[in-house]
Amino acid sequence: KREVVLWEQQWISCAKELNQWQQLSEFAQKGDHNNLLVDCLWKVSDWHTLKERVLRVQMENTPKVMMVQGYLHLHEGQVIEGDQCINHGIQRALHRWWQLPDIAARSHLPLLSLFQQLVELQESTRVLLELGMVQQQQQHHSYSELKDILETWRLRTPNFWDSLGQWHDLFQWRNHIHNIVISAFKTFQDQPHHMHQIGYRDKAWSINKLASIARKQNLHSLSLDVLKTLYGYYQMEVQEAFVKIREQVLACLNIPGELVSALNLINTTNLEFFPQQHKAEMFRLKASIYQKLNNSEQAHSNFSTSLSIDPSLADGWFSWGSYCEDVYEAHGNITYLEYAASCYLQAIKIDTKLAKKLMSKFLLWLSFDNTSSGDIVGRVYDKYGKGVPSSVWLPYVSQLICSLQRPEAARAKDLLFKLVQAFPQSVYYSLRTFLLDRREGSPLSRHQQYSSRSQQGDASKQKHRGAARDWGFGHIPTVAEAFAAGKQVMEVLRSEWALMIHELETFIHEIGTKFVPTPEERLLAVVHALLQRCYKYSSAPLNAEVPSMLKRELTQICKACFSSETVTKHETFVKQYKDDFWKDLNPDVEHSNFPKSLGELIKCLKSWKSRLESSIAKKGCNVLKLEKESTALQHMVFENIEIPGYRQSRQISTQEEPVYVEGVLSDIDIVQRYGSSHRRITLLGSNGEKFTFLIQSGLGPSTSCDERVMSLLHAFNSVLEENAETRRRATKFFTPAIISLWPQITLVEDHESFISFMEVYEWFCSRFGREPDAPIMKFKELVSSALSTNVAQEQVTLTPQQILEIRFRAFSDICTHIVADNILTQYMYKALPTCSHLWEFKKRFATQLGLSSVISHTLQVGGRSPNKIIFSRSSGAIFNSDFYPLFDSNGNVECSEPVPFRMTRNIQVLLTPFCLEGIFVTTLSSCAQAINAERSLIVPHLGLFFRDELLNWSWRRLRSPGPAPMDLKSMVKANVVNSINRMKVMEPTEAINTKTSVSSQHLQKGTYDLVENAVNPENLCRMEPTWHPWF
């Protein structure tokens, strides 16, 4: 019975979304669902049944029932009685509002919608009163209140992602009022003609708007049904008639078998009454139909006709360019690439909002298609790109800088010259880091040649721009040439913004020198990293000899930690630690105490870790004072410095005023995270907000990679914001500002509420006096002892299945006796003030975790150990540190982890089955569906991401500019295709059985399979112990 009730509820919900009120009314009458019947009858205008049979039944006076009673009274012209019912409904709704939790949540939304209906019902009484006054005295009446109310209704609409039932609740009553207005003006005499049109105009607008929303929510058949049935009059203004035809055609374009109907509709429409812009749009739609019908000649002809009628139609240029791009991708005809590029540039000049969709394609064409086509894209940009504002390239600063080492370097340098004129600070940080990183890879002779050339020339902008074309077309710059090109851009920037650059240099220098970890903290981070490295030898017995590779690394680390520079700057630190450290951990020192086995090395590293931690703790300083650390920043007068990364992270428009730095707050927090120490600095913005940044230091590729990942997530967010399903669920990637100050120092937007999973686990261990590494040691001990015992007894090599069983037993033992499954739940229960906060946190956390899992699986980024997943205790937002893919020798993404993403025991217990199978799974599916629906927009961004990652990977490994253009193109294409295929797996898929016409599998089967793999203990036990699969 409960299952039947559930099926009924789901069917009713679907029928409401599809506006099937007549069927719902019949169902409610047969099943005695009075509340549902009340909601249906007024929408099908069955007022008699509503009055005689339903409202006379004893029912609870809910706000909904009172509102329907108000509808009935106003329909019968009883304005006073209707107003009383409305007031009673508002009182009951307010009473329910105060019963809801204090924090804003989705539970408030139905009441907010109800309040809007009640307010519009009140406004309807004023409309009826004004119409009644006009009947008594028609002369000299302006109808001002009627006009204001109808205009307000146009402006006060639900969001496009709100349910269609909510839209229909509002628009059905508005439709009823519009009919009353139309009927009233038919009886009025001596009224101006435009007043007789007021009801028709607003009713047509409402119907077209409702149909548009249905189409945007992928209910195309419903959109056609709304347009055909709800208006009911032959009379309609030209503007609204055009909108109606356009909506019908757009809906037919997405319905199989309706293309011919859409074509017939346009062909039978008399275009003489439409203005030029509307005629052009009609021909554009006609061309789109022919494009879907694979009629190339007619498509080109109609696109051409459309733009000859109205050359300023941005959508026309965009559609024609998209068609030419499809032809180029299918047949490789270079001429169509030229057409597509020129059409897109024309569209951007008319409407810069289209740049978000198109500029990534231009960058990819310049990288991969321009060389083989003889610089055709570059020549098109020279010809048509003059009116394109430089701001359209602002989101791609890091990609343009990366292009300085590719064949399109001359073009990229030209664009960077334009950007530094308008947005110098947005270019400065990334360009500075690029130059510092490439300076070491630039040969001295080439650098000297460049320096001599630059000394001979003037530093003016014109000469620098002339130097942009020094290289021949198709030439791949060397490291020195890429460095020289970047330096030319930097010199222009310094010459034109000298005062601002001086301020920035002072700001960066103080942060990079005064707010970095102390030598002790750096040494602790090194010891901690070495300890984790030892733990990764999970199957090696503790009495095994230290691997030779690890010995070589220890020798290099000892030299690096106590280099000549460190000896000069930190004499006290060197005297205190160098001799002991070298004696214990340097295998090349004579008479050293270097451990003989892996177990002894682990003990030695643990003792050093304890020694350094106690030494740092004795200082007992968690907060530094700005006046003691940096008097220069304390007394610095900020005039020109913007909040770092504000424009990029907030995605504000270029017309908006940036937020400037007003000062630095005096308290500098010391943040300890998993063996590393960071400083947290707070900047005061000119808008009164406080902006907190974590100053992270360390070597590795994560800095530039994190910036590229944020750029990719911004592209994903732009798609998710336009999709009704994801917008309704508030599905949006968290994208903090990440700014690279030096190759080893990064500013990351942070907040005191952020904490890593590992910090939660360490909190649990300190609470009960346990060692955080105990599970790792236990796992290592159990696995190594079991392996050695089996080998000794049987004298044979164990099969993979036997090794898996050993790891599974060790994993189960740790889960049972050492690590509980409710640690994260306990922590959040203590951290949050009320149960309402906890419930809201779980919902947001499940959404953010779903998004994190989508991007991890799509890009095949592994290594999501607890210290690399950071979440906010206040908002549930999740940030992944060190988030970058690894590549094999062929340039393909390499990830051998058995789990697609992290979904361990503690996360499962926190989410509960309701959030896991409800919110988490739905987030994965809806996000994948939204991104796949806009695949043509996402693929270029993925291509740029993998291009830059492969170039960075090549630079890190070989210190080379990267693969040849054609090799790089094939690598990028293969990785993009694989990523899209992984995204498709998570998309809801309906497999219909042809015999029964019933779906043979769950819609979200792909996502459920991934979750099952992620939670499977047999997969978890195969993970590295440093991944903490038991947590």
Image (cartoon, grey):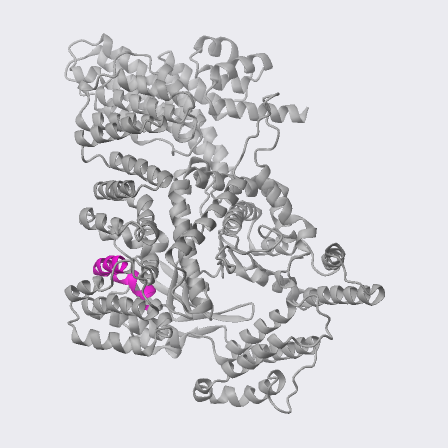
**Majority secondary structure in the magenta region:** helix
Is residue 772 found left or right of 267 in the rendered image?
right
Q: Within the image, what quadrant is residue 210 found in?
A: top left
Up the image or down, 988 lies above or below 471; here it is above
Q: Quadrant of the C terminus?
A: bottom right
Q: Residue at x 65, y 68 (%)?
A: 535
- Residue 643 appears anywhere in the view: no
Most foreground residue, 417 or 27: 417
Specify whether residue 988 is painted magenta.
no
Most foreground residue, 32 or 754: 754
Residue 267, percent across and down?
Answer: 27, 18
Question: Which residues, given as a range, are shown in magenta?
Answer: 410-432
Residue 554, percent across and down?
Answer: 58, 79
Counting every numbered tag in the picture gives 0
Q: Within the image, what quadrant is residue 324 found in?
A: top left
Is residue 307 found left or right of 925 in the rendered image?
left
Most foreground residue, 800 or 72: 800
Residue 206, percent across and down?
Answer: 32, 23
- Residue 5 appears anywhere in the view: yes
Up the image or down, 492 lies above or below 993; here it is below
Residue 274, percent across and down?
Answer: 19, 22
Is residue 248 found left or right of 21 in the rendered image?
left
Q: Quadrant of the N terminus?
A: top right
Up the image or down, 1003 lies above or below 720; here it is above
Specify whether residue 425 is painted magenta.
yes
